[in-house]
Image (cartoon, helix red, strand yellow):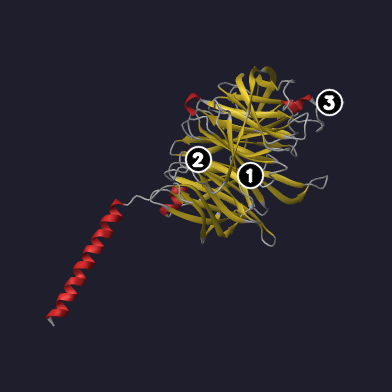
Amino acid sequence: MMKRLIRRLTFFVVLFVFVSEVSAQEQDYVPTPCQSIRNTFSSIKEHKSIVRSNNDYRVVHIQYNEPLSGLLHTFVIKRFSPEYEIALSANFNIGAPFCITDMRIYNGEFYYCGTVVSDVLDMEGNPITYGVVGHFSPQAFFSGSGHMYVTEVKEVSTLTRLEINTSSSQLELISAIGTKDNNTNACIVELRHVALTGGTMWTKNLDYLNPTFDIYFSDIMYTGDSLTLLSQFKCSNNYLPGHASYDTRHQMFLLDRSGIDGFSTLLAPIWTHNMAQYNIDNDSYCKFHSNRCPMRLCHIDVADNGFGVAFGVRETELYKGGIRLFPFGNTWYYDSCIYYRTGVHAEIRDIGNLHGTSQLFVVSEDATYSNGLVTLPTLGSAAHDVYWLVDTGYTYNSISQSHGTVLVDVDITGHKGPSDYTLFQQSINSLILPSCFTKVEHHYDVFAGKHSSSLLVNWCTEKKEEPIWKEVELTEIELKVDDECKKCGYMD
């Protein structure tokens, strides 16, 4: 009996020591941060996606064209602290399918815009289209009181990009660019949040150029003290330089800026001023961009209100192409620009930068990398380096700075194979370490700076009916995550 008791006491002492050691180890244990991660979500299908994040949340909007059900919308929302992630299927109850084309986060609220394709046909037999704008608070979802809202913008044909800032009224101003008049004339929809006695309301303005000058609005971005608008001329054809019918507008782009209250004015329905017009030098071998090519704005050195213009170009002497990038301190001059070769018919899908730096990240596509290519140019690099991140079998659609992990710098969304939603995470500053991507180092060429010329334009503003916000029907769905790849430190 005594021996049995001693054995039990010995067992409990050993067990207590073992548990105490494990507990102490757990308290002292610090997990090794991983510089490269790839996760596939088998419960979600993806064809297109947009990822955006801030210090508190990451939101991914995912679109999938289901053959039987039509276009499906899923929002994957992650809270970083305490860490938690949910997936919501959205039914917008609009009565027609639409694509979300852009998404932004501002002061903790997420905003999106897109284009509806209705069943009604115009006189030429084309579907009638119009815009939508929506918003939601991820914090409210995690507190149990979350709602998502959408408003239909019937005054336009399409909405492609948007930006949000605080106007002089200290409330939000949503500026969404697109087209009106059956997709022929460029326009900006301004939804302004206005304070009233005892509450608030939203107003709607429609801004456009008159005459149009055949200008197409490409992107819009808030740069600390103003809104910057990037535009291009519509080209009559896609003939390359040297052709008898070559259109010189293939080597031009335009910049414009407004104050924090947007491009509308309270003084008059029409106002005149100058846009900055840039013509890429004729001696440049990579000056040609296609008609209505996706041109994008990005932040550079945010503290100085700097910004960049980027788009895909074609080399005029060879069947090759790549990315041109122009850094600006103001709209009227750039002191240099860069070009790096990727492939012919290059187009930008998404672009961004590490906050307050000249470290950029780009998702593009071309004839060689039709599923997408991630490139990481560092402006001002003495070696003129640009990394490529590639991997066969995956598609890359969107990229954003990551805020939720110790080491990872960017989140990249796309899919594995035909449609399995995949989230890639990579540290830009740890590219010497093992990665889930194949890394290839390339270089970029540097070209001299240029002053712009001036294009006199007339802006017109029309006040429209107040927007009506409708609630979106949301259903939570299960998240099934497969950890496909993790590279932590020097471990493979």
In this rendered view, identify the residue nearer to me: 360 or 305: 360
Q: Secondary structure at mark 1?
A: strand
| Structural distance between the alpha carbons of marks 2 and 3 | 44 Å
Front tag of 1 and 3:
3
Mark 2: give few (<14), some (14-19) or many (20+) Cα within 10 Å: few
In this rendered view, identify the residue nearer to me: 116 or 270: 116
| Position of residue 131 in the picture relative to residue 359 (left or right) | right
Q: Secondary structure at mark 2?
A: loop
First in sequence: mark 2 vs mark 3: 3
Q: Which residue is mark 3?
A: 242
Q: Which residue is mark 2?
A: 432
The location of residue 431, given as percent across then percent down, is 51, 40
Residue at the bottom extreme of this rendering: 1
The location of residue 278, given as percent across then percent down, is 68, 22
Mark 3: give few (<14), some (14-19) or many (20+) Cα within 10 Å: few
The answer to whether one can see residue 3 in this image is yes
Inspect the image, locate mark 2, and give the three-letter code of the amino acid beneath it. Answer: Ile
Inspect the image, locate mark 1, and give the three-letter code of the amino acid beneath it. Answer: Gly
The location of residue 456, given as percent across then percent down, is 69, 18
Q: Quadrant of residue 279?
A: top right
Mark 1: give few (<14), some (14-19) or many (20+) Cα within 10 Å: many
Front tag of 2 and 3:
2
Residue shown at 74% from the left, 46% from the top: 128
First in sequence: mark 1 vs mark 2: 1
First in sequence: mark 1 vs mark 3: 1
| Structural distance between the alpha carbons of marks 1 and 2 | 39 Å
Q: Which residue is mark 1?
A: 114
For residue 329, above or below residue 194: above
